[in-house]
Amino acid sequence: MDGSATPTMDTSRASRNIAAQSTRRVPQSRGVQRPSDVGVVSGEVMPRHYMRMHGMQVHLIRMQQSWLSVTVPRMAATQAEQALVEQWRDILALHARTQCELDRALHGHGLCASDFEVLDVLAGCRAPKGTPSYRVQEISERVHLSQSALSRLIARLEKEGLVERCMCPQDRRGVRVALTAKGRALHGEVLPVQRAVLARMLTDDTP
């Protein structure tokens, strides 16, 4: 050895630089999501906030489908019921108009619509022998009046000489009603008037 000094390296500074570089945080590249911020929907990786939005949309769609499944049939039922109500009211209105027209047309003959209905039912009665007659109950079923109302009507027609009452041979408690000659003649006179009103009211399309 020539006694000259051997050059040495300052390893302490190099070690500190290497340590600093090893501990320095490497920044994440933009656009790369951390695992905690992503999820999988239908096999696709999606950010968490997209997943929440997707879940809300699915929930709203299901709520809408549930509402439609209940509301649409209910609306259809309501419309069908309303159609029936309107049809029923049209029938009532037509009946009321026709009844008024019959009363007005028959008034000049001393009758109302219900009076003529009783005469018309009795005129259509046929019997193999004896006087054609009906029980009060049988007349009530055809003219759609209560027995009390029908009894009062028959009493008035009897007073006017248009009908007569007699005891039922099979049942002494029963009462039968028949047309008199006067009642049959009046029925034949008024029949064309009543039929003309029905033809006009029930075949006319205008209310």
Image: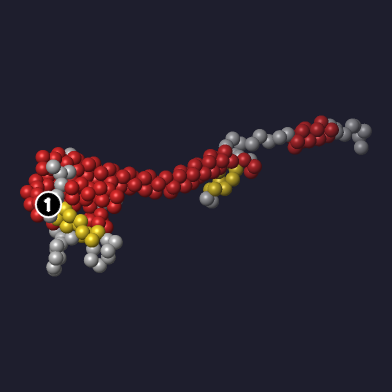
Looking at the image, can residue 88 be seen? yes
Q: Quadrant of the C terminus?
A: top left
Write the residue at 29% across / 50% down: 148
The x and y percentages for residue 41 are 54, 48
Residue marked by disc 1: 183
Task: Name the kind of residue labelled 1 in the image.
Answer: Gly
Q: Is residue 123 above or below residue 78?
A: below
Pointer 1 local density, CA inside 10 Å: few below 14, some 14–19, many at least 20: many
Q: Is residue 5 left or right of residue 205?
A: right
Chosen colour scheme: secondary structure
Could you say which is closer to the camera, residue 133 or residue 43? Answer: 133
* Residue 137 or residue 197, whichever sits in front: 137
Position of 191 with respect to 12 (left or right) is: left
Which residue appears at 13% of the width and 40% of the height? 107
Give the image location of residue 120, x and y in percent: 15, 53
Indicate the secondary structure of the residue bearing disc 1: helix
Counting from the top left corner in percent of width and height, residue 150 is at 25, 50
- Front residue of 189 and 1: 189
Q: Which residue corresponds to the image point at 22% horizontal and 52% vertical from the top-left?
A: 143
Indicate whether 48 appears above or below 180.
Answer: above
